[in-house]
Image: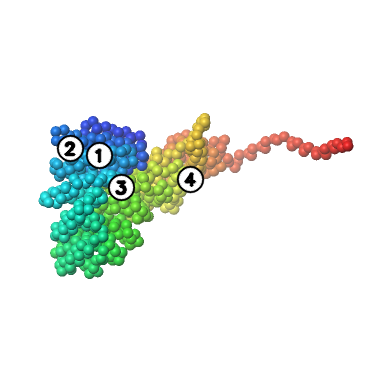
Amino acid sequence: MLVGLCRDASIVVRVAAVGALGDAAALRPDRAALDAFLAGPMHQLSDPETKIQEQVVSLIQQLLMERLKTYEPSEEDATPWLFLEGITRHKMRRHLQKACTLLVKASNCINHRLVDLLSTHLGVLDDDRDLQCLVLLTSVARHVEYSDIGFLLDYYYNLTERQGRDGRLLPLTVELLAAWECGLAPAERAALRQHLVARLASAADDGCRTACASLAAQLDPENLQWATELMQISERRALEGTDASEWLRAADVSLVAPAPPSPQLLRLFLAALANPPPEWSAESRGLCVAGAGRLCVRSRAAAAALAPPLAALLRDAAAPQCARLNALLALTDICTRYSCIVDPLLDAVCGCVARGAAAALRRAAVRALTRLLLAGYLRLRTPLYYRYCALLADEDHDVREPAEYYVSCCLTVDTIYHHFVDCVLYYNNQETEAISFDARQLIYDIMLQRMSLVQKLNVQCRLAREVLQHAADVCDEREELPPALHAALLDTITLLCGPRMKLPKKPEKGGDADIDDLQERVTTNIVSHKMKRTVAEELVPGVLRLYAHMRRRGGQLAAYLVRIATDLLNDYQHEIEELIENDEELVERVQQFQETIGLEASFGNARNLVTASAPPEPDTPRARKRPARALRAPKRRALNI
């Protein structure tokens, strides 16, 4: 329950839930309590409220950073290692990286001493402890300039000599060496580069070939002849056979080779994507797609030629999942360099976030889309906007969280306001993917959280004009509402009755106030006045016209119409009386509605109901105007000299 309250709309509730889960993890640091912390507060590192982010960062500092000690077998605090074990088990390395970025701004706990402490644990116990150390070290490496990396170099050589180690250790070690390679002596740099080139020339693929090639080029950027030679050797082997691993090797090494890859290699990939060899397994097809993605990064011509077949593979539901995942990543890489190539093929990427797609593909697609949006390589246009915002109510947390972060923290409020009414109509369209009523309300709630009072008022006006009045016009022409309009009308009335759309009444007069309070009071006065006119001129007529058509059929929609009309008449009775006192037909409709639902008629009395038979009011007697004073010439005095 507390984990769910971490995402509550109320800031007070979120703060309390995060604090309770943090206290539980600190007082009883077992696996269940830390998993609850990772499932709830850890995801609030992307909360739109800064104070909640600071609260979570403070808890992470208490649970992890302050409890790390130098390795001693006799006594050890298990809390930080249980925390890191949960990070690796739930694949939350990106969350840890964000936490370290915020910790650097908030405190000085990320420094050389932390690296010294972790170096005493690396390579001492087992692969699990090594993995936890490397995950934390790679998260802090970009914030600490560390030069004494002899322990890391020894660990790398030891790791490559032993077989059967965890496959995740070597990529993290190479990444850490690339971040701190400035601390290597010239002899160490030459030996490490020679070792990396020898591993690249071997037939085995350790899963980090591109990282090793990049590190070897980084150690000696002036001498890259080895990369060209390795690429040409792999190209000859690829042209001679159908082994996809050699194709991938040639594409990997081409990323750092100064010479361009052969055009024959590009034609080889194009032919294999169009008609894969029948003897290829799913793994071979995945390797082929990964190699094609490397060539797309290398040249624009290759990207333009390979992007359409990659998009076609992404749309093919019968293709192997590994091949489709690699095609998605390849299109993402192309978009970061040549967005105009991917724009016409964006529907293939959008199809990956559909509810019927594989879970792994959906998670990868939403992460890729979010990264492209954050970096500015992609613009959130329709229909991508509707599909992306629909992920706010997705049941899969890994799919929902990136969309929540982008919509809550990065998407402009003007964009949300501009598309809000269109979202109501789109999500109720029968031609689009079905979304449940509760899911739609959750999406609307997240969007309304960031809107100002003026924007909420304008949304109410647009909903009244574009949905309520349109539905009333349709009812005048035909008996039944279309299903899509009926569902949109139900969503609209639910929104207008809900707490998110409640606008403030005119504030009470107070004493002295600062300029911010005065500005807020003036804004509230303007919004309150405009709200009165909207209620009297647009909402009330539309609701009464709809109820006149719907009351005979009954049902949920008629019940909601009664509810919203009753709320409007109760909340804005005096304003409605003032603004519709000359509209005899509307006053009569209000009276009929009150009589229908069993209320006493309170509108249209002798004071404010004007009829044709009523005698005119007598003119108010006025006093006679006083005549104007006569202008007299001033007396002139004689000048005595």
Task: Please tell me which residue is depicted at 18% across the width and 40% down the height of the picture.
Answer: 120
Q: CA distance from mark 3 to mark 4?
A: 38 Å
Q: Are marks 3 and 1 in contact (CB under 8 Å)?
A: no
**For marks 3 and 2 on the same chain, the one whose residue lies earlier in the sequence:** 2
In this rendering, the count of numbered labels is 4
Above or below, 536 relative to 167? above
Identified by mark 3, the residue type is Pro
Q: CA distance from mark 3 to mark 2?
A: 37 Å
Q: Which residue bears the numbered disc 3?
A: 402
Q: Which residue is mark 1?
A: 113
Residue to which mark 4 is pinned: 538
**Residue 17: horizontal and vertical position, in percent?**
30, 34
334 sits to left or right of 623: left
Q: Are marks 2 and 1 in contact (CB under 8 Å)?
A: no
Residue annotated with mark 2: 71
Select label 3 or label 1 by which is in front: 1
Question: Which image quadrant for residue 279?
Answer: bottom left
Q: Secondary structure at mark 1?
A: helix
Residue appearing at x 29%, y 64% in the figure: 299
Q: Quadrant of the N terminus?
A: top left
Disc 4 crowd rating (10 Å Cα; few below 14, some 14-19, many 20+) is some
Q: Residues within 10 Å of mark 2 (few under 14, many from 20)?
A: some
Mark 3 touches mark 4? (CB < 8 Å): no
Q: Position of residue 606 (x, y in %)?
A: 56, 35
Looking at the picture, which amino acid does disc 1 mark? Arg
